[in-house]
Image (tube, helix red, strand yellow):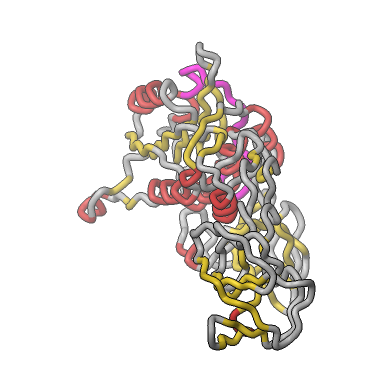
Amino acid sequence: MSACGAEPGLISIDQALSLIQQRTQVLGVEIIDLNSALHRYLAENVYSNINLPMFSQSAVDGYAIHADDVIQADATFALIGEIRAGQSAEFELKHGQAVRIFTGAQIPNGTTTVARQEIVKTLENQTIQISETLKSHADIRDIGEEISVGQCLAEKGQQLTVGAIAALSMAGIQQIQVFQYPKVAVVITGDEVAETVEDFASGKIFDANAPLIQAWFKQRNQTVDIFHVADTEQAVKTLLADLSQNYQLILTTGGVSVGDYDFIRPVALDLGFEQIFWKVKQKPGKPMFFAELQKTDQTSCYLLGLPGNPAAVYVGMQIYTSTLLDAFQGQASSLQWFSAELSHDLKADARERFLRMSVQFDQAKLKVQSLAKQQSHMLSNLMQANCLVRIPAGDKIEAGQIVQGIFI
């Protein structure tokens, strides 16, 4: 008998990720409001239709002045009015004149410089005096100095962050074209899921997987539909047959191993799903299943079957579901691996492992520390974990060795 993790047919983590990227059809595009686009990927370049600033404006609260070149200290100017932000400057300054102006307000024609209010004294007879030498063109924001008409603001494939949305909003962009999110059904299998405390009397347990997955998608600004199904072949078959016609992704937890009540894989194959891979040489989450159903309308429904243990589900979401969602949107995986020094020894294992760890800077080095309670049915250490670290298979890993991880 083969050792656990060494049986034939297992593929590597990298092979599994590559197959997800290669086999997943890119979805179409849609136009949505910018304020709903957090985490979405752009399906086209975005160009500016305006200059930014749209007009030359004051960078400070102060006074717009018309003068020749450098203004010497103690120079005086006639104050002829005031311009607040949002008001248009409908007059022209002449030599020796000044106007009170506020940050962001349009500077009037004829302005050669702006004097910040801290260096200005107000005299009698609507006269101001500059207390310091002032260069020409001080504190003026020129039209188009940040963005000009026709400038590319964001490129196709770029993921929209909070900062990107703010920058596009300032440029007047209100709608954008993005790659579609898949419609996702989440199937929680198992008769053991408790709905009330009283259910514990019959040996049931509370479900962590549905809240975990729902919160994970919510963090990505996406909603999913949750379904629970009993551990019977007919119940699984009826549900998967229906979901496969209405969703682009079916994400399941449990029922993908070789137990007597593990019906996800055999039912999916019976319904016409083509197996892309089953079982990955990793820990936790070895019996992961990925399959595709090609439908008569030339579209596909994909099934990603994760093991039932919640730690395996968590790893599957962070590593594989993330990669799959990116592939739907025509993107390479968004997994951002960091390198860090392992602060302690780790025993050898036949499979690559994803361990929940704590990462922090120590004397200018990024270091990771493993946490207790790493078993696949345990989640409590996620209260302290801030990264998943990928530990190579084979030999013992020694303290000081460099390992790869992702922040969570």
**Residue furthest to the front:** 125
User: What is the quadrant of the C terminus in the image?
Assistant: bottom right
Relative depth, front residue between 62 and 69: 69
Please report the residue visible at 28 percent of the width from the left and 48 percent of the height from the top: 194
Residue 323: quarter of image = top right
Across and down, in percent, residue 344 comes to 70, 71
Vertical arrangement, residue 137 with respect to residue 203, above or below: below
Does residue 190 appear to the left or right of 255 in the view shown? left
Does residue 96 appear to the left or right of 91 in the view shown? right
Q: Is residue 17 magenta?
A: no
Across and down, in percent, residue 61 comes to 57, 74
Vertical arrangement, residue 179 with respect to residue 143, above or below: above
Please report the residue visible at 51 percent of the width from the left and 13 percent of the height from the top: 297
User: What is the quadrant of the N terminus in the image?
Assistant: top right
How many numbered circles does the render carry? 0
Relative depth, front residue between 83 and 66: 66
**Residue furthest to the top:** 296
Does residue 312 appear to the left or right of 15 in the view shown? left
Please report the residue visible at 70 percent of the width from the left and 43 percent of the height from the top: 151
Residue 16: quarter of image = top right
**Residue furthest to the left:** 198
User: Magenta part of the protein: which range?
Assistant: 268-286
Across and down, in percent, residue 358 comes to 60, 68
Across and down, in percent, residue 400 comes to 77, 70
Vertical arrangement, residue 144 with respect to residue 358, above or below: above
Please report the residue visible at 61 percent of the width from the left and 52 percent of the height from the top: 54
